[in-house]
Amino acid sequence: MTEIKPDKPQAAPRSAYKVFRTITTRWMDNDAYGHVNNVVYYSWFDTAVNAYLIEQGVLDIHQGGTIGLVIETQCNYFSALAFPQTVEAGIRVARLGTSSVRYEVGLFAQGEPLTAAKGHFVHVYVDKQTRRPVPLPLNLKSVLETLV
């Protein structure tokens, strides 16, 4: 019996993403091997998406009644990033559900045409108090639709 193997992940071009955010690397991002540690990439995913939503006025982390909880995350690495590089994070929405969103983020070394890493995470939006899923607020949904 022949096993079907999934396609090998490939770096993505800038054209695959709708908006970009600049992220400055820090000295502490490098690990003992001289490149950015893998855990930092996940932090950059969160930073890029949440900062964008805050700037768009659709996420209030202090007073808002709806919050996004990460239920899934994944990352593929293609080339190393290291301090003092500047990183450009491309953002898109791959799936927009009733109460959930799959964000895809590509991390590029400044000016490079292909992702050094790319990944995704899924937010389920919930009531801040009850932690039960709620429909996406209309203002959030409108902003997210521009990223599809």
Image: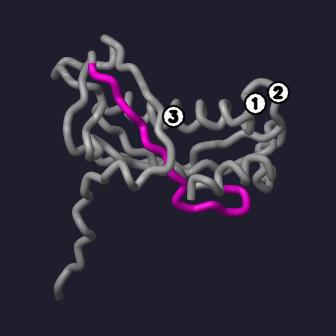
Q: Is 107 located above or below residue 2 in the figure? A: above
Q: Which residues are magenta?
A: 85-100
Classify 10 Å Cα crowding around label 3: few (below 14), some (14-19), many (20 and above). many
Q: Is 95 located above or below residue 23 in the figure? A: below
Local SS, label 1: loop
**Who comes first in sequence, dot 3 or dot 1?**
3
Local SS, label 3: helix
Based on the picture, tell me whether residue 34 belongs to the magenta stretch.
Answer: no
Based on the picture, tell me whether residue 95 belongs to the magenta stretch.
Answer: yes
Residue at 25% x, 29% y is: 81
Going by the numbered disc 2, the residue's amino acid type is Gln
**Mark 1 — residue?**
60
**Which corner quadrant of the image does residue 32 belong to?**
top left
Q: Nearer the viewer, residue 48 or 61?
A: 48
Going by the numbered disc 3, the residue's amino acid type is Ala
Is residue 125 left or right of 112 when viewed as pictured?
right
Is residue 54 left or right of 119 when viewed as pictured?
right
Residue 48: image tag: 3
Q: Nearer the viewer, residue 129 or 24?
A: 24
Q: Are marks 3 and 1 in contact (CB under 8 Å)?
A: no
**Which corner quadrant of the image does residue 51 belong to?**
top right
Going by the numbered disc 1, the residue's amino acid type is Asp
Local SS, label 2: loop
Q: Which quarter of the rendered picture does the N terminus lie within? A: bottom left
> What percent of the width, then of the height, locates residue 131?
77, 43
**Mark 2 — residue?**
63
Q: Which quarter of the rendered picture does the C terminus lie within? A: bottom right
Residue at 26% x, 52% y is: 11
Q: Are marks 2 and 1 in contact (CB under 8 Å)?
A: yes
